[in-house]
Amino acid sequence: MAATIKDIANRTGLGLATISSYLNGGNVREKNRQKIEAAIKELNFEVNEVARGLKTNRTHTIGVVIPELNNIFCTEIITGMEDILRKKGYATIVCDCRTDKKLEREAVEFLYRKRVDGIINMPVDSTGAHLKQFEIAKKPIVIIDRKLPQIACDSVLVDNRDAAKKAVDILINNGHRHIGLITGPEEIYTAKERYNGYETALSEAGIQIDPGLVVHSDYTIRGAVSGVEKLLDAHPEVTALFAANYEMTMGTMIVLNERGISIPEQMSVIGFDNREFARALHPTLTIITQPTEAIAAQVAETILDRLEQGEQTAPKELYLKTEVMVGKSVKNI
Amino acid sequence: MAATIKDIANRTGLGLATISSYLNGGNVREKNRQKIEAAIKELNFEVNEVARGLKTNRTHTIGVVIPELNNIFCTEIITGMEDILRKKGYATIVCDCRTDKKLEREAVEFLYRKRVDGIINMPVDSTGAHLKQFEIAKKPIVIIDRKLPQIACDSVLVDNRDAAKKAVDILINNGHRHIGLITGPEEIYTAKERYNGYETALSEAGIQIDPGLVVHSDYTIRGAVSGVEKLLDAHPEVTALFAANYEMTMGTMIVLNERGISIPEQMSVIGFDNREFARALHPTLTIITQPTEAIAAQVAETILDRLEQGEQTAPKELYLKTEVMVGKSVKNI
DNA sequence: CAGAAAAACCGAAACGTTTCGGTTTTGAAA
DNA sequence: TTTCAAAACCGAAACGTTTCGGTTTTTCTG
């Protein structure tokens, strides 16, 4: 049905290899170039990427495995990456693993079978074992939001420790002493880093850390809701909360809202990500924001570099900074 | 490097065709089955989907083109679909076209070149011209949120007219007479339908329609912000607003918030989608919600049916209903 | 204009499957 | 034990490219 390279060869009287060479940017005599281009237009030929992939072992496809598609931080990064990668002819297959190690491994295997050229992962499994097959096959791996020392891969990270410290510093400077932290699972790198920032800020200020004020939840809205409820019940002395990702910020707001706790009079709050959400709340929320576009661009460029150059240079780590967006949700006491 | 079917054939002493037949569910003598399975395990063979694709003309890949990945309605649907499709061995390539017809066409062409087996689209271009090549190639097309009479395809839709009517009815029943509508571009089907619902509700109640109260914006947060600002400036008589998608609901809240307009005392509001957002606001928001999971499931099943059965039955249309989630953002006046 | 170097061209083989048509094996019935 | 249909098996060809090694054509040099 569809025209093949052979049809072009016949039509132009040239050889197969010549057409192939033309298609891949090789040199062709001017008059032949014209003939080929005419034939291509006439038969509206398009190279069959599948056949090409069989020969070259490249599918021009990149796999992306993330913990949650319904997480605005993830989708913003994906949007940005997809844009850049598509412009370079790469398709992106996104798999959502629901923050589940087993599903994550399955997703990676799925993508491996699909023979993607490389993989981008915001890992749930901190050992990186699931990525081993990509490492063995020498296919590039780019990690977001974590370091995987056991795997040869590049990482793009945000300075989460600093981010959390900035947030907690603000609360301390406003006189708060009993500050609740709602963060992610202990085994997740970003959550640990954010906890470290919290700890550092408190100890620098000479405030004793009360482990009861730290909620290790699961980065979901629902998780935050139950975590915050328990925290408030057990520790009425808390005057400020810092929620360490967007979903948990939302969960925190839901609880405060449903309990009729007014912000910032009865509770000061600092959230994470999603500027629009922060602006839509009343009073507006003070938040820490991550540079999602920059992350996306870095990740895309990093994997493209590995893919095109294929250089076996040492793994790179790239750190990006967060920002504070000041709202009216912190009270000076 | 990787084992091929040939290696399995050699190792087992069987023929190529037999191995292939086994791999595709054909019958094999018990002792051969064991040999084959042993060989597969030993060489850890995996069929090369690219080579298979070249022969069968199937890539087991489905393209998805949506207007915005940063739109929670879209991501929820994608999450659901991806889940179902992946379980059936299909990969999903998602392209975000930024609500731009040209980019949409490019995305579809990109996917066509990638030889996806079928396409799922929430179309920006209402003519459907961009999908023509899929129709010609007889590759299944499933449309979300719109009908494309000019293209042979299945559609999964939500009863948007009814959704909007329900919302406006609530406002009318609470005594509102000057109701602002913030909806999408006139040429977008869902926006038109939602407008129709608004119109129907008002005229059934015998209320004259004031075109000045209708904002046709672009379904984005930013668009809603400027639209609502203009609306409020020009029409101080408005006592209630209905925002007809999630992003515009957020935009509406941002403006009301920044202007210090209290809800529901000074303005009643009904929004759209995202239950968590509605719950996180104070007071909680009354919203219309769409059954995203059901939509996702329907879309996935529809395309799988077409793909597996390949039956040339007539295009199907499937309608799903919305729900109202009652909050405290509507005042009885 | 001859000769040589460079550029352009060429067909065959290969990538790893599926499928076609035909052959062998199996085992149940006679 | 023979017969024969059904089941299992088989290799070659094909899918549409790229690439290898070698041939032809062009262009440049003296």
Image: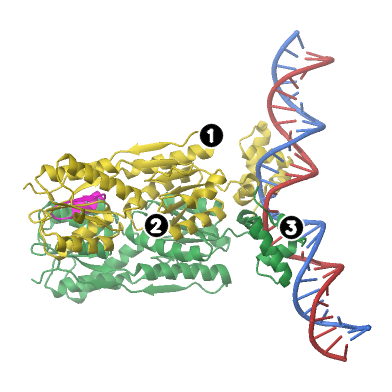
Chain colours: A yellow, B green, C red, D blue
Quadrant position of residue D15: bottom right
Q: Nearer the viewer, mark 1 or mark 3?
A: 3
Does residue B103 appear left or right of residue B251 in this picture? right
Extreme-left residue of the structure:
A333
Mark 2 → mark 1, Cα distance in angstroms = 41 Å
Residue in front for this viewpoint, B219 or B81? B81
From the top left corner, tell me how far across and down residue A66 is, in percent. Answer: 41, 53
Q: Secondary structure at mark 2?
A: loop
Query: Dot 3 lies on which element?
Result: helix
Q: Nearer the viewer, mark 2 or mark 1?
A: 1
Q: Chain of mark 1?
A: A
| Quarter assignment of residue A67 | bottom left
Measured as percent of width and height from the top left, residue B302 is found at 48, 70
Residue A274 highlighted magenta (yes or no): yes
Residue occupying image coordinates x 24% and y 73%: B166
Which kind of residue does numbered mark 1 sit on?
Glu
Q: Mark 2 to mark 3: distance in Å?
A: 54 Å
Task: Give the spatial CA distance, label 1 vs label 3.
Answer: 36 Å
Q: In the structure shown, which secondary structural element does the residue marked by tag 1 occupy?
A: loop
Tell me if residue B215 can be seen.
no
Q: Is residue B316 visible?
A: yes
Residue extent of the magenta highlight: A269-283
Relative to B81, say whether B109 is above or below: above
